[in-house]
C-alpha cells in the first residue's frame, strides 16, 4: 500500500511544476492529461479484480509491481503531453488502482473474525507511507531532477514490491496448511477450504453494492476535490498558503486513527452503521469549510474531513467481503474501484465548476454536502444481502 505512492496524487503533485517548465506545457494541459490517465486507468480495475480471483493475489501483485516500476522508468523518457498522458494512464492504473486493490484483497482472504481491524492496520500504515512521500519526493526532485526521481521510484518499486509478492505472501491460508484467522475448524470432518460468496453479476443486482460504491465514490470525489483546491479554498477563509498546506497534517492524523478505530468497529457492528457515520461526517466536514477561520476551527475542519476519509477506507475494504464473501472478491472490488477512481478524477473539476458558477467556494459547499446525506439515507433504507449467497 505504501508503495502505491508514486501513482498517488500526493506523489505526483511535487513533480507537476518541474514537468510544466521542462516540457513547456500548461497547467490545464497537464491537468487534462492527469484526468484522462485516471479515468482510463480506472477502466482496468474489473480485469485486475478478475485476475486476482483466477490467478491469485501473489502472481497479480508481482505482475502489477513489474508493470508499475517499468512505467515509472519509461516516464523518464517523455518529451511531450502525449507521452505524459500515456504514462499517467500506467501509473494511475498500476499504482493508485491495481496495487492497492491486490494488497487489501490479499488481507481479506486471510482474516474473517478480525478482518476489519486487519484491514484498518493496512489502511492506516499505507496512508502513513503515502502521506510522507510529498516531502521525500520533493527533496528527491530538488536533488536529482524529475527524470531521475521517477527512475529511482521505479527501481524502488521493483526492489520492494517484487520480493514481497514472490517470497513475502501466499494467496490463501490453505496454500500453506493454515486456516482463516489461524483458527482450525471445530469439526475438521465437515470443514472445506472452498471459497463462498456472491458472483459479480449477482452482487450488481443488490442495492447494498450500489450503496457501498456510491459511498466510496462520493467520498473520493469530494475528498479529492477539496484537497486539490485546499490552498485556494482555505485562503478564501483567511488562511495563509502555509496555514492551508499545514491543514493536511491533522487530516492525515485523523485518517490514521479513525481507520484503525473504524476497522475494529466493523468487526462488531453492521457495516451500515459505519457507512452512515462516514457519510454524515463527510457532510459535516464539507459544511465546516464554510466557517473555517485561522486557528482552532481550521484544525477542527482538518480532523473532521480526515475522519470521514478514515471511515470510508475501512468501509470499502471490510464491507464488501462481509456482505458478498470472498469467492469473487477481486471481481467485485475491481468493479467498485472503477467508480471510486473515476470519481476522484472528477472531484477537482466538480469543485472548480461550483466555484465558477457561484463565484466562490462557500456558496457551492451546501450543495456538495447534500450528496453524502442522501447516501446516508439510502444506506439506512437498503436491505443487507444474505451472507454467502449461492452462486447464480
Image (cartoon, rainbow, N blue to C red):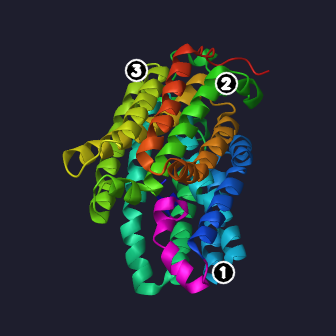
- The magenta-colored residue range is 6-25
Mark positioned earlier in the residue sequence (3 or 2): 2
Pointer 3 local density, CA inside 10 Å: few below 14, some 14–19, many at least 20:
few
User: Any magenta on residue 189?
Assistant: no
Question: 172 or 246: which is nearer to us?
Answer: 246
Residue 13 in the image: x percent, y percent?
48, 67
Question: 213 or 163: which is nearer to us?
Answer: 213
Residue 77 in the image: x percent, y percent?
65, 83
Which mark identifies residue 78?
1
Instruction: Determine which residue is flagged by label 3.
Output: 268
Pointer 2 local density, CA inside 10 Å: few below 14, some 14–19, many at least 20:
some
Mark positioned earlier in the residue sequence (1 or 3): 1
Instruction: Determine contact: label 3, label 2, CB under 8 Å.
Output: no
Mark 1 to mark 2 CA distance (whole Å) = 46 Å
The relative height of residue 57 versus residue 273 in the rendered view (above or below) is below
Local secondary structure at mark 2: loop
Q: Residue at x 34, y 50 (%)?
A: 252
Residue 100 in the image: x percent, y percent?
55, 50
Q: Is residue 102 visible?
A: no
Amino acid at each position: 500500500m505504501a508503495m502505491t505512492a508514486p501513482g498517488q496524487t500526493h506523489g505526483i503533485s511535487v513533480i507537476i511544476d518541474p514537468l510544466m517548465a521542462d516540457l513547456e506545457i500548461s497547467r490545464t494541459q497537464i491537468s487534462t492529461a492527469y484526468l484522462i490517465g485516471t479515468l482510463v486507468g480506472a477502466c482496468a480495475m474489473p480485469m485486475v479484480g478478475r485476475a486476482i480471483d483466477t490467478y491469485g493475489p501473489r502472481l497479480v501483485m508481482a505482475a502489477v509491481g513489474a508493470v508499475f516500476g517499468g512505467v515509472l522508468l519509461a516516464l523518464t523518457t517523455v518529451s511531450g503531453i502525449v507521452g505524459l498522458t500515456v504514462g499517467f494512464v500506467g501509473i494511475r492504473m498500476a499504482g493508485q488502482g491495481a496495487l492497492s486493490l491486490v494488497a487489501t484483497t490479499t488481507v481479506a482472504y486471510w482474516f474473517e473474525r478480525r478482518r476489519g481491524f486487519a484491514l484498518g492496520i493496512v489502511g492506516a500504515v499505507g496512508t502513513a507511507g503515502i502521506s510522507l512521500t510529498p516531502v521525500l519526493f520533493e527533496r528527491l526532485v530538488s536533488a536529482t531532477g524529475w527524470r531521475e526521481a521517477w527512475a529511482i521510484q521505479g527501481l524502488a518499486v521493483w526492489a520492494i514490491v517484487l520480493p514481497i509478492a514472490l517470497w513475502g505472501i501466499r494467496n490463501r491460508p490453505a496454500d500453506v496448511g493454515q486456516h482463516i484467522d489461524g483458527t482450525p475448524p471445530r469439526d475438521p470432518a465437515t470443514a472445506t477450504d472452498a471459497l463462498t460468496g456472491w458472483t459479480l453479476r449477482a452482487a450488481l443486482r443488490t442495492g447494498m453494492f450500489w450503496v457501498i460504491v456510491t459511498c466510496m465514490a462520493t467520498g473520493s470525489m469530494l475528498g479529492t476535490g477539496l484537497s486539490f483546491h485546499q490552498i485556494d479554498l482555505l485562503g478564501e477563509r483567511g488562511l495563509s498558503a502555509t496555514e492551508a498546506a499545514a491543514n493536511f497534517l491533522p487530516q492525515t492524523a485523523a485518517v490514521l486513527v479513525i481507520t484503525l478505530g473504524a476497522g475494529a468497529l466493523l468487526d462488531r457492528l453492521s457495516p451500515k452503521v459505519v457507512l452512515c457515520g462516514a457519510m454524515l461526517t463527510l457532510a459535516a466536514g464539507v459544511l465546516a469549510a464554510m466557517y473555517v477561520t485561522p486557528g482552532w476551527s481550521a484544525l477542527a475542519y482538518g480532523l473532521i474531513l480526515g475522519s470521514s476519509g478514515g471511515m470510508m477506507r475501512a468501509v470499502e475494504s471490510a464491507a464488501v467481503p462481509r456482505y458478498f464473501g470472498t469467492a469473487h472478491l477481486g471481481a467485485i472490488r475491481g468493479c467498485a474501484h472503477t467508480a471510486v477512481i473515476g470519481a476522484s478524477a472528477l472531484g477537482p473539476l466538480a469543485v472548480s465548476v461550483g466555484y465558477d458558477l457561484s463565484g466562490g467556494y462557500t456558496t457551492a459547499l451546501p450543495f456538495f454536502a447534500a450528496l453524502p446525506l442522501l447516501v446516508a439515507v439510502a444506506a439506512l433504507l437498503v436491505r443487507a444481502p444474505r451472507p454467502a449467497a449461492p452462486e447464480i
